[in-house]
Amino acid sequence: MISRRAFNAGLCTCLSGALTACVTHQTGPTTGMADVPVGYRPNPASDEAGLWMALDKVEKVVKVAQARIRDKAINELISGMMCRLTGDHCGDIRSYVMRVPLFNANCAPNGAVQVYSGLLLRSSSESQVAAILGHEFGHFLKRHSLQRMRDARDRGDFMAFFSLASGVSLNNLAMMLAKLGQMHFTRDHEREADSVGLQLMADAGYDPFAAAEMWKRLIAEREAGDVEENFDVFTSTHPAPSERIETLTRLAEQRGRPKNPAPDRLAEALAPIRGILLADEINLGHFKQTKKLLDLLLADGRNPGEILHYKGELHRRRGTGGDEAIALGFYHEACESVGAPPESFRQVGLMRWRRGEKQQAREYFHRYLTVKPDAGDREMIKSYLMGA
């Protein structure tokens, strides 16, 4: 595993070599660029090549990052979605699913796509994921990163742009990747990417109304709490939420829902790792926002027992007045619902045992070992069952 210090040193070295060189390379327009052609690689003598060189080196680090999720199902889903959305550009795109509990995705100018687990967890459908991926591919297609770099240089604040790319605190891998991928696009860039992305998703058979719905969910979660860094890496330069929802809804109405809709495979692909992602969200310690996220997921109706279990975990981990009783209630509710993890039964058993309710505790310990006979703590649980 690469250390953060080594990651930092390597990244800054490759960026300082490639991006600093961009200053003296040939330049071009900051607006009105042609779309990226299929199979494109920039002229090695161009400033664009310097940007790609830096991002090619960063991609090598991303490939082997510990934070990369290698689950086959979710990776095949994302790579397949990108091909469906990008058409002939499919061969130019490489997708990486990152275990980062933030709402974000990005498509770098060199075709490297990072999709964060926080985005996948928050999406209620494949179409909602497609809305974000289409948006990010819009940035790639319209060369927004190159426009941003040239504009910064021409205004004389190239070093500010360079600082954004190379000076990010790498204690937070997610923030670094997001800033490298997006490089603070202008609001006009974001609007163009929204329009392009919605057309791409609609052309691919995804429901265009899912774009606005995705933002409504995100706004509801953000407004529930007072911690904003979960979202700012994606929203800091985007148009106002009300404007974005209004525009996306209008564009969706113009297109209408697809006659031959794309399949919705997200829930199935995400199921094997959703518990891990839910635990990651709880580990952030953002109680109000995580509570709202869990409420949204519970309303989606997929494996409610799993969500109820993590609502119990959220209260148990916070541990303030009354939380223990609330957590126990959620664990109990989870045990009687579809999709409950075996740990729900164990938690009820342990909490009942500590209360001195040993008969009830044994009932749930038995149920735990029934649904998870190969549990790693089987011998410990058996000692409770045999104890006085």
Image: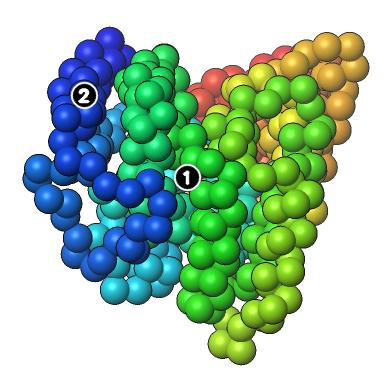
Total marks shown come to: 2
Left or right: 10, with 77 as reference point: left
Residue where numbered disc 1 is placed:
105
Residue 178 shows in the view: no
Q: Nearer the viewer, residue 77 or 6?
A: 6
Q: Nearer the viewer, residue 47 or 77?
A: 47
Q: Nearer the viewer, residue 69 or 223?
A: 223
The percent position of residue 101, horizontal first and vertical second, equals 54, 33
User: Which residue lies at the image location 80% right of the left edge and 34% below the top edge?
Assistant: 223
Q: Quadrant of residue 154?
A: top left
Viewer-nearest of discs 1 and 2: 2
Amino acid on which disc 1 is placed: Ala
Label 1 environment density (alpha carbons within 10 Å; few <14, some 14–19, many ≥20): many
Left or right: 127, with 22 as reference point: right
Left or right: 286, with 118 as reference point: right
Residue 384 shows in the view: yes
Residue where numbered disc 2 is placed:
20
Q: CA distance from mark 1 to mark 2?
A: 26 Å
Left or right: 14, with 376 as reference point: left
The percent position of residue 10, horizontal first and vertical second, equals 20, 19
Does residue 124 sit above or below 52 in this rendering?
A: below
User: Which residue lies at the image location 45% right of the left edge and 58% below the top edge?
Assistant: 138
Amino acid on which disc 2 is placed: Thr
The percent position of residue 376, horizontal first and vertical second, equals 46, 29
Earlier sequence position, callout 1 versus callout 2:
2
